[in-house]
Amino acid sequence: METLKKAMPARVQITAILKKALFSGEYKSGDELSLTEIAERLGVSRTPVREAFQTLEAEGLIELRMNKGAIVKPIDEKYITDHYEMRILLESEAAKRAAERGMPDTDALLKKLDALQDRMDSVSTEEYEELNLAVHSAIWAAADNERLYKFLSSLWNGPSVSITAPKLDHYKKSTKEHIAILKAIQKQDA
């Protein structure tokens, strides 16, 4: 979690971590989530975990229980599909706006992605996820719309890695896609 601290508030980071666990099936319908256990596991205070729980409850993913943590609600494939469709729609708009307005750190991100691509077989999950978030958040920032940035941050749950596909294959494909998107933004090709 240390690498995300630079980019997002703790409550947003924890919400993203928990969403990823919920979407991947790590937590299943009916599982009880303990505020204290999650705070200890993530090395944070209970406050940002409580805030993340409130966000997840508002999104219909968990049910809060007074002084008893939370219970995971059923999450079906439609919910997950709807979530990623919203990310696609909003991130596409953010990329379009970044291309129209310009994005100052495109060259630096492209260099980092090229370097990552050259040594993909030895890249750690943490390193990939840190650069992945840097690319996404740079595009959101370049879109120059605070509400869009906040909404995309609230939808963030990390890289959309399939639980059935190998991570390395996803990292390679995703890196190529990020390079293509940044090159289009660089050319102001919305």
Image (cartoon, grey):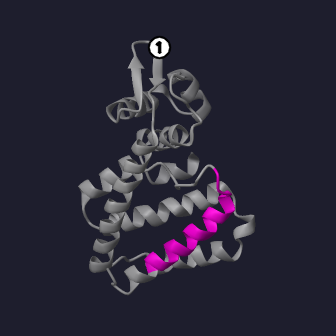
**Which residue corresponds to the image point at 57% horizontal and 47% vertical from the top-left?**
2
Q: Is residue 72 magenta?
A: no
Q: Position of residue 42 (x, y in %)?
A: 58, 35
Q: Is residue 182 above or below residue 169?
A: below
Residue at x-position 59% and y-position 28%: 40
Quadrant location of the N terminus in the rendered image: top right
The residue located at (47%, 13%) in the rendering is 68
Which residue bears the numbered disc 1?
68
Q: Residue at x 66, y 58 (%)?
A: 167
Image vertical order of residue 137 relative to residue 117, above or below: above
x, y (%) of residue 129? 57, 57
Residue placed farthest to the bottom in the image? 187
- Left or right of 174 on screen, residue 92: left
Q: Is residue 95 left or right of residue 24?
A: left
x then y, percent, for residue 14: 48, 39
Determine whether 5 is above or below 184 in the image: above
User: Is residue 125 toward the left or the right of residue 135 in the image?
Assistant: right
Q: Residue 124's quadrant in the figure? A: bottom right
Which span is picked out in magenta?
Answer: 164-182
User: Residue flagged by tag 1: what amino acid is it?
Assistant: Lys
Quarter of the image for residue 88 reads bottom left
